[in-house]
Amino acid sequence: LVEKQNAEMGLMPVVSDEESEYGYIAENRHMIQSFLEGKRPKENFSDGVNVTELLMTAYMSAEQEKTIAFPPPDLDSFVPAVAKGKWNPKKS
C-alpha cells in the first residue's frame, strides 16, 4: 500500500484489502501451483520485459510530448526523469 502512495499532489485512495482487490492472492496461488507442478507460469520473465519496455516507451513519449514508434531505437539507454529525481509534478 505504501509503495503506491508517493504522489506529490492529490489524495490517494485507501484500499483496505489490497491483496484481494488487486488480485495478488490469485497471482501468488498461480505461481506456487506452477512451481509445484513444474509448469511454466502464464506470465513469465519475457512478459515482464515486454511490460517494462512498454512502460519505458510511455515515459519517453510523455517526456517528449509526442507519439513515438514502439520500440524506440534508444530505449535501452533511456532513464525517465522520474527515476533521475528530476520530475516535477507541479510543472505539468
Image: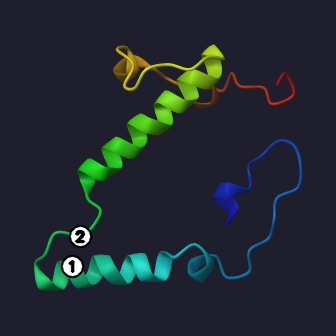
On the image, which quarter does residue 17 sit in?
bottom right
| Tag 1 and tag 2, C-beta contact below 8 Å | yes
Q: Which mark is residue 26?
A: none
Image position of 27 with respect to 13: above or below: below
Q: Residues within 10 Å of mark 2 (few under 14, many from 20)?
A: some
Tell me which residue sits at (34%, 50%) in the image.
48
Question: In what element is the residue under mark 2?
Answer: loop
Residues under labels 1 and 2: Cα distance?
6 Å
Q: Residues within 10 Å of mark 1 (few under 14, many from 20)?
A: some
On the image, which quarter does residue 92 sit in?
top right
Instruction: Give the image's coloring scheme.
Output: rainbow
Image position of 18 with respect to 46: above or below: below
Tell me which residue sits at (41%, 41%) in the image.
52
Tell me which residue sits at (49%, 38%) in the image.
55
Amino acid beneath label 2: Pro
Tell me which residue sits at (34%, 42%) in the image.
50
Where is residue 34? Give x, y as percent. Answer: 21, 79
In this view of the protein, which residue sits in the foreground, 78 or 63?
Answer: 63
Q: Which mark is residue 34?
A: 1
Amino acid beneath label 1: Ser
Question: In what element is the residue under mark 1?
Answer: helix
Where is residue 26? Give x, y as percent. Answer: 43, 82
Q: Which of disc 2 and disc 1 is earlier in sequence?
A: 1
Q: Which mark is residue 41?
A: 2
Where is residue 1? Give x, y as percent. Answer: 67, 66
Where is residue 58? Give x, y as percent. Answer: 54, 31
Give the side of residue 35 with respect to residue 84, left or right. Answer: left
Image position of 62 with respect to 20: above or below: above
Q: How many marks?
A: 2
